[in-house]
Image (cartoon, rainbow, N blue to C red):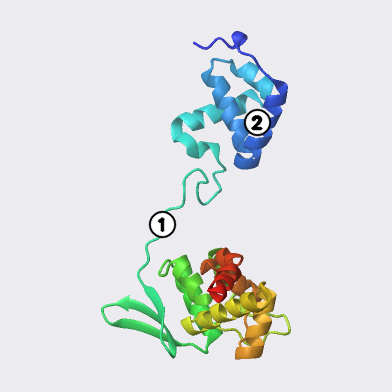
Amino acid sequence: MINCQEISFSQKLQQQRMAQAQSILGTKVTDHFICFALYLLGVSRKSISTLTNTPPGTIRSRVRAILSNGLSALEDRRSRASTFLPPQEKETVASIYIEEQSTVVDFGTRRQLKIPRQNILQTRVILLTMLQSNLLSSRDVSEVLGFSTVHTGNLAKKLHTGDIAALIDKRQGQKQEYLFTSDIKAELICQFVLDIVTSSKSSGKLLAKQLNKRCKLTLSERSIRYHIEKLGLSKVKKSLPQLISGLKKK
C-alpha cells in the first residue's frame, strides 16, 4: 500500500501538470482521472468529494462506470467516437486517376465513372459524396482536387450539411479553378525554378501571378503553397540557386 504521508507534493508542479492535462484531455476527463486515482489509493469517497468539490453520489457513479465500461466511461457518452484511440483506417472500394479529358473513378472489374475534367463543381460533388460514404480515401480525393486532406474533409462536411451551394465560392474574382493535373504541376515546377533562378525567391502569390500571366492558369495561392510543400520544392529553395551558380562556374 502506498503511504501518501511520505510523498512530497508541490503546488507549483500540481498547477502546471493540471493545466497541461486539461489542455490535452479536457477538464472533465482530467477530473475523472483524479477521482478514480484517489479511489484506487484508498481515499474515502467523502474525502474525495471534499478534495474535488464533487458530490459523493457523483463519485460513486464515476467509479462504478469506469469499473464497468473501462476508459470510455471517462469521456462524454454523447461523443460519436473516442478521442483515446486513433481513428481506424476506413476501407475504400474505389480509386481515382486523371485521364486527358476525364477524372476517372475506378471500381475495378471494368466499372468506371468518368467525369469531364472541365466540370469542376460536378467533380467535387461526386468525389466528396463518395468520400463521405467511405468509397474513396481522403488522400486520393485531396490529391485530385488539389487541396489538403483537412480542407477536403471540411468541404465534405459542408456538402453534407449545406448541399451543393456550400461548395460554390461566393467571393468575386476567381472565375475558374483547375484540378492539379500533371501538366499543371509541370508548369508550377518550371515557374518555381524560373523565379528562383531570376530572383532567388518564390511565393504562392508570386507563382499564382506568373502562372496566370504566362500560362493563363488561375490557381489559388493556398493550393499552390500546398503543392509546393507536397512536391518538396520548399526544401530546395535555398540550395537551388547555389547549385546553379556552381554549375555556371564549371
Residue 226 x/y as whole percent: 58, 69
> At x 56% / y 84%, what residue is drawn?
178
Above or below, comparing residue 150 to residue 23 in the picture:
below
Residue 40 x/y as whole percent: 51, 20
Q: Nearer the viewer, residue 241 or 105?
A: 241
For badge 2, the amino acid type reads Arg
Above or below, comparing residue 176 to residue 239 in the picture:
below
> At x 49% / y 87%, what residue is drawn?
117
N-terminal label among 2 and 1: 2
Residue 43 x/y as whole percent: 58, 15
Residue 198: image quadrant is bottom right
> At x 46% / y 48%, what residue is drawn?
86
For badge 1, the amino acid type reads Glu
Give the residue number, with chain letter if any, for mark 2.
Answer: 17
> At x 56% / y 63%, what residue is drawn?
235
Give the residue number, with chain letter if any, for mark 1.
Answer: 89
